[in-house]
Image (cartoon, helix red, strand yellow):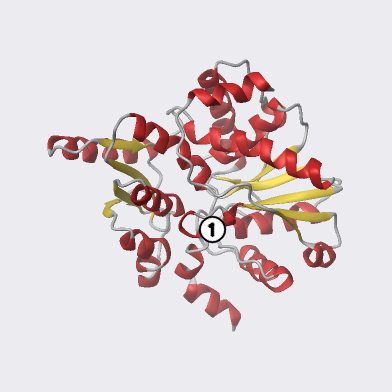
Amino acid sequence: MDKSFGRIDAFPRERLARTPTPIDALPRLSEKLGGPEIHMKRDDCSGLAMGGNKARLLEFYFGQARKKKADTVLITGSVQSNYACMAAAAARRMGMACHIQLEERVPDVDAVYRTSGNVLLGKLFGATIHTYPDGEDEEGADNRLHEIAEDLRKKGASPYVIPLGPDNPPLGALGYVLAAREICRQIDDANLRIDETILTSGSGLTHIGLLFGLRALGRDMRVTGVCVRRPAAVQARRLIDLAGRLSDMLGLPPLVGAGDIHLTDAVLAPGYGQHNDDVLDAVRLIARTEGILVDPVYTGRLVAGMVRRLAGDDRPPDGLMMLHTGGLPILFAYQALIEETER
C-alpha cells in the first residue's frame, strides 16, 4: 500500500479540491427503493466552480502545467463540459489563461443548451472558446488542441494541453487513487457497511483511479460503472487499457484485471447527453426524496443505473455508495426538456 501511494508523491500536484468530501446517508431514497442502505460520496461538494469530480483530476494536470511554467491551459470537451468549465476556474485561480474547445456530441440542442450552464460559466471565467465539429473523434480533438497551442506558442505564450484521448498518460486518475484512501478511511471511521460503489464511467479516469486505489489498499469492494458515452463492451476495453497505463506510469505490477471491471449500459440509450425517461425520473426521484440535485448527463444516469441495478435479477449489495460527480450547471442547459416532461 505505502509503495503504491508513495509513488504518487513524485507527480506534481496543485491543490484545487476541498477534501475530504462527505459521505451522506440517503435513508428516504433507500426506503423508497426497498433495497440496501444507500450512501452518497458528495464530490459535488469539492468546491471548485460549483464542485465535481474533475477538481481531483485537474490537480495533477495543473501540477504538470505549473512544473512546465505554463501560462495558458487548453482543454476539450462537450458543449456543456463541466471538466472544461472547472479547468477555466482552476486556470484563473492559478493566474493562467484558458482555451476551451467545445465538441458537438449532442444532436438537436436548443439555444439554452448552447448558452447556459457551463458555457455561461466558462465565459464568465474569461475562457477563449473554440469549436470542434465532431463529438466522437478524441484523437482529432486532441490534435486540434495542439494546433491551437502551437499558434499560441508562436505568439509568445507557454501553453499546456490537458488531453482527452486514452493514449495519453492517465495523470488525472491519480486524483481518484488518492480518493480511494480517503473513502476507505471514512468508511472505517464511521463503521459503514458498503460493499459496492457505483459511479459514472465516461473518460474512465475516475472509474479506473478509484478501482486501482481500492485494489492497492487490498479492498475487494465492487465498483460498478454506469456508461454515459460508450457501450459497456467498448468501455471495458478502454478501462483495461487505462489500468495498464496507470500501472506503467507508477512503475507497479497490474492491480486491476478484467474480472474487476463491472459496467452497465442499460440507461445509455439513445446516447451521450440525450433524452432518456429513466434518467429524468431519476433526477426527480433523488431531488424529491433527498433534496439532492443531479444533472441528466452524468449523475442522473448514475441514479437511473442504480435503480436498474437494484431491480435486476442478481443479488443486490448489502450496502451501496453512489459517487456524485457534480456537474450541476448542466442541469440548467436541459431546462426545456425538464419543464416539458413535468407537464
Q: Is residue 24 above or below residue 7?
A: below
Image quadrant where one finds the C terminus: bottom right
Residue 248 horizontal/vertical position (percent)? 53, 18
Residue 164 in sight from this viewpoint:
no
What amino acid is found at the position of numbered circle 1 in the picture?
Val
The residue furthest left is 155
Q: Which residue is located at x 51 percent, y 61 percent? A: 274
Q: Is residue 284 above or below residue 274?
A: below
Which quadrant of the view contains residue 289? bottom right
Q: Nearer the viewer, residue 172 or 269?
A: 172
Residue assigned mark 1: 297
157 relative position to 9: left or right: left
Residue 196 horizontal/vertical position (percent)? 77, 43
The residue furthest bottom is 343
Q: Is residue 76 above or below residue 237?
A: below
Q: Which residue is located at x 78 percent, y 44 percent? A: 187
Q: Which residue is located at x 38 percent, y 62 percent? A: 121
- Neighbourhood count class around disc 1 (C-alpha, 10 Å): few under 14, some 14–19, many 20 upward: many
Q: Which residue is located at x 31 percent, y 49 percent? A: 101
Q: Secondary structure at mark 1?
A: loop
Count of picture labels: 1
Residue 266 in sight from this viewpoint:
yes
Residue 272 horizontal/vertical position (percent)? 50, 54
Image quadrant where one finds the N terminus: top right
